[in-house]
Image (cartoon, rainbow, N blue to C red):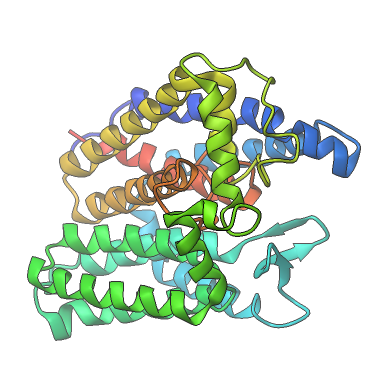
């Protein structure tokens, strides 16, 4: 192992801070109208986001300064805790229902979302499991099926809430780890077909998901129902043009785009800051992914490499899905934009994970 670098990757660190700063500004701008209408305080969302940002930055500083190999020792325990929380949240009267999903544990408006923590728990455990020299991932029955079964169990518990978006992000990041660990493309191709069939089954099983698919293909077929979110999002992006209407000047945040501070915050950003503002955000995410993958390719430790791939994959999958939904390229799934959207559990978890990535960058060549 090489001598540790005196500091984490500077580009990676600056991208995280840049995206977090943009997120704080946009949470206030996008959510101020709704916050004033519902809570009588236009700063309601940004004050809470600032609190979780501080907690997340403390967690990021902690994980950035803890040797990443420490997490290998606690990966199994962490995964068990995540599974226990996923079971507890499903108990009526214990789990809190928000947005139609029983996904929260907490008191009043404060709470945690166990499915968010399962994403990192699964990444840590799979990285440890598949980094073992004794594990032959090229074998379908003995090497590939056990981790897939574990992932399927976690995905099933998340879907009981139900929370398809978070489950999809977890599965996407986990599959990137499995691919990087050396799974055969033939096996992954067959799994892809099986996954597609299962996805179709999930859509058919829940009528509201089928409505989202049809709305994605033709939102104007139900402009006041399933297609409403996509249409209003596009109405926000279109007038933004090259430079935007100006910070705070969005019209769609006035009760047109639902929950503009969370899933559709990028549409408000594009309306106010235009193509240039949206491009800056995308470039920051691209640099973050590039520097993260550079860490994964150059760190001389298999566990560290797989861990970096999983964390970067979690960010990348979430960004692609969120922006794909906002611009009408994907069905609505209810996924936030990392570091930008309002949300305590997601922000704290993301900063914690990125802190681990910063620590990994200390060891990269």
Q: Is residue 61 above or below residue 17?
A: below
Q: Is residue 191 above or below residue 266?
A: below
Return the residue nearer the eye: 156 or 3. Answer: 156
Where does residue 180 sit, x and y in percent of width and height? 17, 57
Q: Quadrant of residue 29?
A: top right
Q: In this view, does 139 lie above or below 16?
A: below
Which residue occupies the extreme front position in the image?
A: 221
Q: Which residue shows up at 72% across the image and 69% down it?
A: 97
14 left or right, relative to 96: left
Where does residue 65 sit, x and y in percent of width and height? 44, 39
Return the residue nearer the eye: 218 or 289. Answer: 218
Which residue occupies the extreme bottom position in the image?
A: 141
Return the residue nearer the eye: 8 or 282. Answer: 282
Q: In which quarter of the image is the C terminus?
A: top left
122 left or right, relative to 107: left
Residue 66 visible in this rendered orientation of the protein: no
Where does residue 312 sit, x and y in percent of width and height? 33, 45
Q: Which residue shows up at 32% across the image and 54% down it?
A: 310
Q: In which quarter of the image is residue 187?
A: bottom left
Residue 40 visible in this rendered orientation of the protein: yes
Where does residue 249 sit, x and y in percent of width and height? 68, 20
Q: Which residue shows up at 69% across the image and 62% down it?
A: 99
Q: In which quarter of the image is residue 8?
A: top left
């Amino acid at each position: 192992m090489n001598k540790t670098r005196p500091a984490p990757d500077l580009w990676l660190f600056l991208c995280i801070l840049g995206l977090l700063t943009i997120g704080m500004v946009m949470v206030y701008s996008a959510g101020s109208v709704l916050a004033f209408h519902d809570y009588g305080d236009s700063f309601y969302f940004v004050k809470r986001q600032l609190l979780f940002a501080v907690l997340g930055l403390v967690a990021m500083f902690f994980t950035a300064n803890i040797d990443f190999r420490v997490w290998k020792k606690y990966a199994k325990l962490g995964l068990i805790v995540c599974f226990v929380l996923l079971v507890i949240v499903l108990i009526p009267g214990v789990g809190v229902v928000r947005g139609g999903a029983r996904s929260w544990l907490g008191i009043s408006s404060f709470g945690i979302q166990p499915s968010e923590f399962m994403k990192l728990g699964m990444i840590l455990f799979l990285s440890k499991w598949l980094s073992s020299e004794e594990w032959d991932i090229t074998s379908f029955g003995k090497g590939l099926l056990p981790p897939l079964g574990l992932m399927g169990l976690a995905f099933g518990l998340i879907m009981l809430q139900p929370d398809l978006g978070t489950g999809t992000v977890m599965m996407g990041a986990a599959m990137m780890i499995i691919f990087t660990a050396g799974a055969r493309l033939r096996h992954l191709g067959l799994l892809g077909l099986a996954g597609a069939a299962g996805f179709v089954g999930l859509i058919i099983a829940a009528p509201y998901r089928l409505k989202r698919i049809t709305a994605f293909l033709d939102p104007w077929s139900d402009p006041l129902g399933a297609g409403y979110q996509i249409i209003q999002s596009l109405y926000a992006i279109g007038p933004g043009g090259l430079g935007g209407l100006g910070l705070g000047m969005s019209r769609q945040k006035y009760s047109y785009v639902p929950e503009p501070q969370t899933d559709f915050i990028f549409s408000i950003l594009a309306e106010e800051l235009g193509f240039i503002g949206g491009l800056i955000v995308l470039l920051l995410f691209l640099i973050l992914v590039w520097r993260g993958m550079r860490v994964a390719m150059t760190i001389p430790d298999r566990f560290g490499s797989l861990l970096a791939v999983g964390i970067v994959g979690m960010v990348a999958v979430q960004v692609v899905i969120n922006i794909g939904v906002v611009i009408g390229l994907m069905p609505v799934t209810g996924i936030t934009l990392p570091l930008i959207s309002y949300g305590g559990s997601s922000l704290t978890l993301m900063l914690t994970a990125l802190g681990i990535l910063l620590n990994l960058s200390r060891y990269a060549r």
